[in-house]
Image: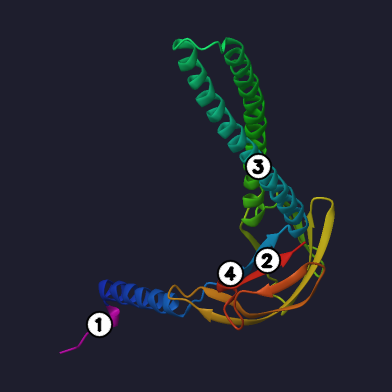
Amino acid sequence: MERKSSFGNPKIMRLLILYIGVFAAIWACEEKVDPTVSDPTVGIFFLNKDSLDVVNFITDSLDEELGIYDSIIMTLGDSADLLVDSLITLTDSIANGGDLKEDSATVAENIVLLNLNLSVIEKEDSAVNVAYASWLSTASTINSGSVKVSSITNNKNGQRIAYEDSSTVWKLPLDMQADDVDLDIAIADSVYNLMIRYSRATAADEKNKVIISASDIEILGTDFNNPYLSCNGCEASQTTIYVEF
């Protein structure tokens, strides 16, 4: 009896081809690595120290001025209390037949004048308080690191990022084609240079996407004042550069 080969059966051949295609697709998915690359950044905190020094000088002066006003208001208040007590005493004496109307009128006039002076001083004190609160708010804003960066330019590859709004959180882009960046940071009418070196590492995540990370941030040079790092030898995502200008 002649045996027929299963490979001659069209149905079996179609199933075999289907299985091969499925396994090939699965194998390809497991082996394929998506070349997606992350763009690491490092945080930077800007403190406008020059402006803060000016603002602190103003707030200190206003605080002293408020202290003087408080002292004057207290003194005028005490004087007013004494005059009121005197007026009560004179009024009682007049009620008992004493001829002290002229003295009483003088005391009453003094009370009116004192209250007028007190009113003027309190208005001036209130105005200084408003100014003081405003300058304290300005100092708080500066201390928060809020600043408007116009642009950040990578001098090595020519890439420039422009910004529109102020912020307290800024991220410096790191060049994943190099181990350092030379950045020009434009703030108001000034441009500050900052050179950074770092280590790069490449790995694939659970979705087989290539992730390039940076660590060991090092400041090579800068026009900013008092630069320092929040963490030495850490990942860039866990590091903040603090600078003053």
- Work out how far the residue at label 3 is from the one at label 4, CA to CA, in angstroms: 54 Å
Nearer to us: label 4 or label 2:
2
Residue 139 within the segment the image draws in magenta: no
Snapshot quadrant of residue 154: bottom right
- Work out how far the residue at label 4 is from the one at label 2, CA to CA, in angstroms: 11 Å
Circle 1 SS class? helix
> Is residue 20 something that shows in the picture?
yes
Q: Residue furthest bottom?
A: 1
Q: Residue furthest left?
A: 1
Residue 6 appears left or right of 231? left
Q: Where is the N terminus found, in terms of image quarters?
A: bottom left
Nearer to us: label 3 or label 4:
3
Amino acid, disc 1: Ser
Nearer to the camera, 61 or 147? 61
Circle 3 SS class? helix
Q: Which residues are magenta?
A: 1-8
- Work out how far the residue at label 1 is from the one at label 3, CA to CA, in angstroms: 103 Å
Query: Mark 4 highlights which residue?
Result: 38
Dot label at residue 66:
3
